[in-house]
Image (spheres, grey):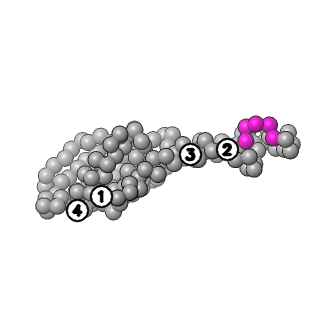
Amino acid sequence: MPDPAVPGTGRAGSKSSAGKQNEPPQAAEAAPTTASPESATSAAPVPSPPEHKASLTDKDKLDAVTKFYKSIDLSPSRALGMLTPVLAGSEPGNLIRAWSAMDSIEVVETSLQPDGSILAVVTMRQPDGGKLRVTQLLRMAEDASGLISDARLLSAQYM
C-alpha cells in the first residue's frame, strides 16, 4: 500500500528552491548575460509569492478547515497533506490509521475566532455505531499558504 501523503510533504520546498534559467528575470538572481538592466531591476519589486501566502481571507480559512475534515472522511492521506509537516509529526501513518478507523465525519460548525484561529465542531461515527463530538481550535500557517499548522483538542464527548 503506497502512502500518497509522502509526495505531499515534499512539495512545499521543491517549488521555491528550484531555479530555472529560461524563466523571466524575476525568477533568476544571477546576472543574466542577455537581459537588459531594465528587466533585471523591474523584477525586484514583484512580491508575488509572499503576497499570495498572506492573502488568505477569513472565508479561505473556514473553507480550508471544512475541506480538511471532509478529506479525513473521504481520503485520510489527502487530509494529511493539508497539515504542516511539523503538525503531521514523525509518524503520519498513525494519524491516517486513526482517521481511517472512523466510519464517517460530519462538520457541524466552523467559526472564526477573534485571534484568527478557527473553532471546529465535528461528529465522528465510530465503527460500533457510537458517535463522538469533537471540538478543536485550528490555526493556519502564515508561511505555508493555507496549511493547518496547529490543532488543539478542546473537547471530545460521546453522544
Amino acid type, residue under disc 3 in the picture: Ser
Q: Which residue is mark 1?
A: 107
* Residue at x-position 20% and y-position 60%: 125
Dot 1 amino acid type: Val
Along the horizontal axis of the image, is 139 left or right of 32? left
Tag 2, which secondary structure? Answer: loop
Closer mark to the observer between disc 1 and disc 3: 3
Cα separation, mark 3 vs mark 4, equals: 35 Å
Q: Which residue is mark 3?
A: 14
> Picture coordinates of residue 15 (x, y %)?
58, 47
Out of 151 and 127, give the one closest to the viewer: 127
Earlier residue among tags 1 and 2: 2
The disc label shown at residue 120, or none: none
Q: CA distance from mark 1 to mark 2?
A: 41 Å
Quick one: SS at disc 1? strand
Secondary structure, magenta segment, majority class? loop
For residue 150, which quarter of the picture?
Answer: top left
Residue kind at label 2, given as amino acid type: Gly
- Residue at which label 2 appears: 19
Which segment is the magenta one?
Answer: 28-32
